[in-house]
Amino acid sequence: MRRLSDAQFAWLLMLPGLALFGAIIAYPLVSALVTGFFEQSLVRPGRLFVGLANFADVLGGDFWPVFRNTMIFTVGATVAPFVLGYALALALNAGIRGSGVLRGLFLFPWVIPGVVVSFLWLWIFNANYGVLNGILGTHFSWLGNPDTAMLAVIVTKTWASFPWMMVMLLAGLQTMPKELHEAASVDGAGTIRRFWSVTVPHMKGIAGIVFLLEFIWNFQHFDTIYVLTGGGPAGATKTFAVAVYDTAFKGFDLGHATALGGLWMLLLLILVAVYLRHEKEDVR
């Protein structure tokens, strides 16, 4: 038998993975994108080619309100857990008493499935028998009010995701040489000055990656929003993930759902490109 070259052998090894990628990811993705150029329904057979009409309808409809809601949720659900996780990581890295036990306790919200977390906070925010209203002595509808629904969703997502950010940032802090802080102390730098002059530059790479990853994940988040509000009230918490689901499986309009999903994917690709560029610069 003819001996295979290294390149041919490498392609042979990759064929099963490429075939699986094509069957599970590439083909469904291309098929879905093509559907965006057709008028197609889940309840009616057949489809009609309409070109860019679906994309024009989506852009002329509620695309921008949904985009605004998505950005509000994404920014809020990324910045809040990042700040909280960073603060806790700094406290744990300082060697406070019981840090080992606290580290395990703080991981508890992260290991709970997202749907379970959502139902837990659904009970906390309940207007009639919720814990929050019980503490405040009110009957305020946190999830039923358009002014507070998004805040409630962001709080829930923050509680679920800050442990992951805390662990990643703590790992970065523990790689910092203690000599850097000792040298800064000898030079007369206080705690705040050491944080900005020593800790922040050292943590720039890992903090940036953690922040960008969480931002990308939140940009496509679904379960917390859908369980708590379903995109309501009055569309106040409807993000791209919820809008695509509602259009496809409640409105039975695959064409418009796919067009909206295609535009959503383009925005995600921009975020992924930023992440890859950031990662490449860190490697250098």
Image (cartoon, helix red, strand yellow):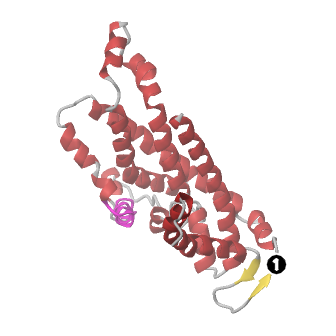
Q: Residue at x 35, y 61 (%)?
A: 117
Q: Residue at x 42, y 16 (%)?
A: 193
In the image, residue 150 sits, relative to residue 62, either above or below, namely: above
Q: Residue at x 21, y 37 (%)?
A: 99
Where residue 208 appears, x then y in whole percent?
A: 50, 38
Where residue 229 appears, x then y in whole percent?
A: 49, 65
In the image, residue 186 sits, relative to residue 129, either above or below, namely: above
Where residue 204 appears, x then y in whole percent?
A: 48, 32
Q: In the displayed structure, does residue 281 sit left or right of residue 161? A: right
Q: In the displayed structure, does residue 180 sit left or right of residue 246? A: left
Query: What is the quadrant of the C terminus in the image?
Result: top right
- The amino acid type of the residue labelled 1 equals Val
Q: Report the span colored magenta.
A: 112-127
Q: Residue at x 32, y 18 (%)?
A: 179
Q: Which residue is mark 1?
A: 50
Considering the whole magenta stretch, tell me its main secondary structure. Answer: helix
Q: Is residue 246 or residue 8 the one in the foreground?
A: 8
Q: Is residue 221 magenta?
A: no
**Mark 1 crowd level (few <14, some 14–19, many ≥20, 10 Å Cα):** some
